[in-house]
């Protein structure tokens, strides 16, 4: 569903959170501003009423006239300012005595609030501070009223003053209107601003995500047959460029793996096709030309030899695949590596002698205990030794050396053979990899190209490593490190260092 996809989209979510945050910020800001405006308007009215009260005290006197106290206003009738102030004071006011009897009251005051109750009058007369009240008049408009008291004038000989309740008011409708206007401004501007903000967010998010979409589109075009494709870097050196570089590296690794797998399939087919062609040829020849039992027998024996080679390849491949996917469990036990090395080296004495190669062993005269799988360790040593003998011409030497190195057993198989060219060194542990140099092809026995793959896996599975150093024409040295008494984990990753000296 497109709406659902849109809502779940990163662009929408970014815009929504941006818009929400923006709106929230504006609302909070509006609330703070409104609060500030309200309190400053309030303060202003209170201050204005206080200064009115001070003016009132100058113009109003409660004096005894004809034996009773009456409020009188004294001001210059001709003075415009005084006239204005007094008329403003008298527009909304009340004066009562202590008992709440009204002495003077503006008609507007009576109309809006009526006479103040005696309880309030008594409370105000007793209170040390004036009382400010927010009142809604009978006209529905808001007012602020300040109430307090004044003393009467004292005549000669009098020593007691009475308190008189006075309240003056002011309409705050205009100020309230100002506050309402502000609220309305906010109510109409905030959604509009949020909308504009959201739109800006949508555009910005779109721009930011555009390159991501481009990466995705390119990634979609990459398939098994177009793994050489790379996403071009934008040159911004930002997070996205980092993502693209990482992605490209991943494609690179995939490409290498794909190439290896493809090469491997080609190699396997090739390896199996050759003996099949030979067997077929032999059997066809036997079928059409053989006449004696002896001839048939020869053809069958020769075919069986080739079939044996094929099964060897299949068995080795199966074992390697199982090993690399962690399906082969090592049967570890405590072994004397020195004894095994001595045994295997002795087994190679006859073939070495046959090839005119001198085989020597050192460092194996004392027991060297390690935790390992005997069968695999023997297989590893045999592979190394058979290669060393195979690739060393007559008159050469093969030395096997065992020694302790830190907490490892270091096993070196060194020969004075044909050596391996530097560009082949990183690949010699790959399955089916054989160096195709004239010198090595001249070697008498053609191998499967799987021996060193086993060596690498066995070293790795025992928690060790294998390293090769070689110089064409001078010789090769394989150095195996096996941790002492270790319990290595079999893994898929190879731990190889190929160096050329
Ligand atoms: P192979 O069955 O062909 O010996 P390996 O995996 O054991 O397969 O070796 C791979 C290739 O590495 C060999 O074909 C050979 O070219 C090269 N190689 C291995 N050991 C030596 C060595 N001691 N001296 C020279 N080349 C070697």
Image (cartoon, rainbow, N blue to C red):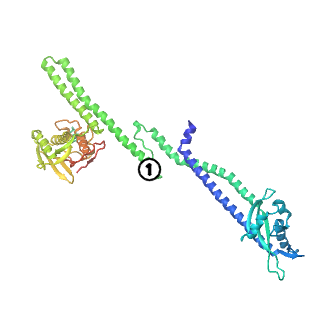
| Residue at 56% across, 42% down | 7
Q: Residues within 10 Å of mark 1 (few under 14, many from 20)?
A: some
Q: Is residue 300 left or right of residue 243?
A: left
Name the image quarter holding residue 355: top left
- Which of these two is toward me, 61 or 227? 61
| Residue at 61% across, 53% down | 24
- Report if the beta carbon of the residue with label 1 is closer than 8 angstroms to ligand 1: no
Residue 357 in view: yes
Q: Is residue 362 left or right of residue 99?
A: left
Residue 53 locus on image (x, y percent):
77, 71
Q: Quadrant of the N terminus?
A: top right
Residue 244 locus on image (x, y percent):
44, 47
Secondary structure state at the residue bearing disc 1: helix
Residue 402 locus on image (x, y percent):
16, 49
The residue furthest bottom is: 157
- Give the tally of numbered discs: 1
Label 1 sits on residue: 242
Q: Does 105 sit above or below residue 443?
A: below
Q: Is residue 413 left or right of residue 250?
A: left
| Residue at 72% across, 56% down | 180
Q: Classify the position of ligand 1 by quadrant: top left, top right, bottom left or bottom right.
A: top left
Residue 205 locus on image (x, y percent):
55, 48
- Which of these two is toward me, 125 or 416? 125
């Amino acid at each position: 569903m497109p709406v659902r996809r849109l809502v779940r989209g990163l662009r929408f979510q970014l815009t929504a959170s941006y818009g929400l945050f923006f709106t929230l910020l504006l609302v909070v800001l509006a609330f703070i501003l409104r609060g500030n405006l309200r309190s400053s308007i309030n303060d202003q009215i209170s201050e204005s009423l206080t200064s009115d009260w001070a003016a009132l005290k100058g113009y109003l006197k409660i004096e005894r006239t004809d034996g009773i106290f009456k409020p009188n206003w004294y001001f210059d009738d001709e003075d415009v300012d005084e006239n204005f102030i007094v008329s403003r004071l008298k527009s909304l006011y009340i004066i009562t005595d202590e008992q709440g009897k009204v002495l003077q009251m503006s008609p507007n005051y009576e109309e809006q609030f009526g006479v103040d109750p005696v309880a309030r009058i008594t409370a105000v007369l007793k209170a040390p501070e004036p009382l400010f009240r927010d009142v809604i008049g009978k006209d529905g408009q808001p007012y602020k009223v300040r109430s307090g008291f004044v003393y009467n004038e004292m005549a000669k000989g009098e020593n007691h003053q009475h308190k008189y309740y006075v309240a003056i008011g002011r309409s705050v409708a205009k100020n309230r209107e100002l506050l309402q206007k502000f609220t309305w401004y906010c109510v109409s501007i905030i959604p509009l601003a949020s909308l504009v903000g959201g739109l800006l967010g949508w555009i910005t998010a779109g721009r930011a995500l555009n390159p991501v979409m481009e990466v995705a589109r390119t990634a979609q075009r990459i398939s098994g047959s177009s793994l050489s494709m790379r996403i071009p870097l934008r040159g911004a050196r930002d997070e996205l460029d980092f993502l693209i570089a990482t992605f490209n590296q991943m494609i690179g690794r995939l490409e290498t793996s794909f190439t290896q797998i493809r090469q491997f399939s080609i190699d396997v087919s090739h390896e199996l096709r050759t003996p099949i062609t030979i067997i077929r040829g032999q059997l066809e020849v036997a079928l059409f030309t053989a006449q004696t039992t002896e001839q048939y027998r020869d053809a069958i024996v020769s075919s069986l030899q080739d079939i044996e080679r094929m099964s060897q390849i299949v068995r080795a491949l199966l074992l390697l695949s199982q090993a690399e996917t962690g399906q082969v469990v090592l049967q570890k036990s405590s072994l004397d590596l020195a004894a095994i090395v001595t045994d295997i080296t002795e087994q190679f004495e006859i073939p070495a002698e046959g090839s005119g190669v001198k085989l020597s062993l050192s460092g194996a005269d004392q027991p060297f205990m390690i935790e390992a799988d005997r069968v695999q360790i023997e297989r590893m040593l045999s592979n190394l030794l058979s290669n060393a003998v195979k690739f060393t011409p007559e008159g050469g030497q093969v030395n096997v050396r065992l020694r302790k190195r830190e907490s490892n057993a270091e096993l070196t198989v060194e020969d004075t053979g044909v050596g391996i060219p530097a560009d082949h060194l990183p690949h010699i542990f790959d399955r089916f990899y054989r160096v195709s140099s004239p010198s090595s092809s001249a070697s008498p026995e053609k191998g499967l190209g799987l021996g060193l793959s086993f060596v690498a896996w066995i070293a790795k599975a025992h928690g060790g490593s294998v390293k090769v150093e070689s110089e064409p024409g001078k010789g090769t040295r394989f150095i195996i490190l096996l941790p002492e008494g270790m319990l290595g984990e079999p893994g898929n990753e190879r731990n190889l260092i190929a160096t050329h000296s």
